[in-house]
Amino acid sequence: MDASATAPATPFSTLIRTASHAAHTEAETSSFMGDMLGGRLGVDAFARYTEQLWFVYRALEEGADRLADDPVAGPFVRRELFRAPALERDLAHLLGPGWRDRVSALPATAAYAARVEECARTWPAGYVAHHYTRYLGDLSGGQVIRDRAERAWGFARKGDGVRFYVFEGIGNPAAFKRDYRDLLDRVNADDLERQRIVDECKRAFAHNTAVFRELAGEFPLSA
Ligand code: HEM
């Protein structure tokens, strides 16, 4: 159908990265991200963002448990990636011990988590798209976010508040990402299914952008 079908030489990891490049730029340059990382918003905005991540990772990681033996998604399930426990420590630090009673999913977050759950239940290849979009991003740009957050709000380096960004179980992130791309290249899916994974990846980025938009609505910058 397209060049990728006749050019098996293009590794799938390159295809998915290239195809989602524009969506990445849109997410990266969203006004909420810019305002938050530019230090123009308070720590309450960072806490609200962290809350949203918790709902998404809960869906991803509850799904992972179910998919550990799946031929398509199973190879991607790695416990050292799991972020929910780190997010829970961050939220306890940011919101206090009663944090569970005080967190709520924005509508865009609820829709995002519901889509992840749906993929985990019914379409493992779609789950791979969500897995890639979050975890490979966290291992990459997440480190930029951590650095800015530590400076803006004075969190201890790699400490409570930013543990989400610290992958204790991954000693060499660059090597991990190389292995991950290798897994993507070998994903157990034909060309058509791979194209569907790319489309789901774009959808995953769109979910992230929608969450940022709603966060921007909650934390408008006062002029
Ligand atoms: C201010 C926010 C962000 C910054 C500064 C940022 C920055 C980066 C950087 C520096 C990389 C590394 C590129 C490389 O390895 O050469 C990266 C990769 C990535 N980012 Fe982001 N990013 C941000 C937001 C996001 C968001 C919101 C998502 C999606 C949820 C995302 C998903 C990804 C993915 C999937 C990759 C891996 C691309 C690949 O190598 O296949 N990023 N990001």
Image: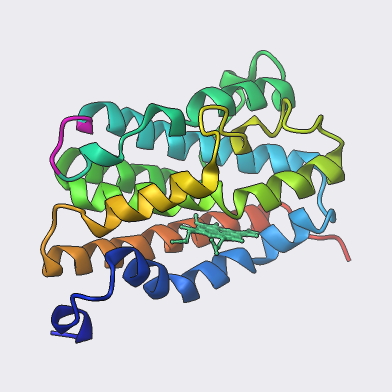
Nearest the eye: 10 or 192 = 10
Q: Is residue 1 left or right of residue 174?
A: left
Q: Residue at x 85, y 46 (%)?
A: 152
Q: Is residue 140 left or right of residue 35?
A: left
Q: Can residue 190 be found in the magenta stretch?
A: no
Q: Residue at x 22, y 30 (%)?
A: 68
Q: Can residue 68 be found in the magenta stretch?
A: yes
Determine if residue 152 is in view. yes
Q: Residue at x 24, y 43 (%)?
A: 118
Q: Quadrant of residue 181?
A: bottom left
Q: Position of residue 164 (x, y in %)?
A: 60, 34
Q: Quadrant of residue 15?
A: bottom left
Q: Position of residue 37 (x, y in %)?
A: 76, 55
Q: Position of residue 120 (x, y in %)?
A: 24, 40
Determine if residue 135 is in view. no
Q: Give the prevailing secondary structure in the magenta stretch.
A: loop
The quadrant of the rendered image in which ligand 1 is seen is: bottom right
Q: Position of residue 84 (x, y in %)?
A: 49, 28
Magenta span of residues: 67-71
**Vertical arrangement, residue 10 with respect to residue 154, above or below:** below
Nearest the eye: 105 or 38 = 38
The C terminus lies in quadrant? bottom right
Q: Quadrant of residue 159?
A: top right
Instruction: Tally the marks.
Output: 0
Coloration of the structure image: rainbow
The N terminus lies in quadrant? bottom left
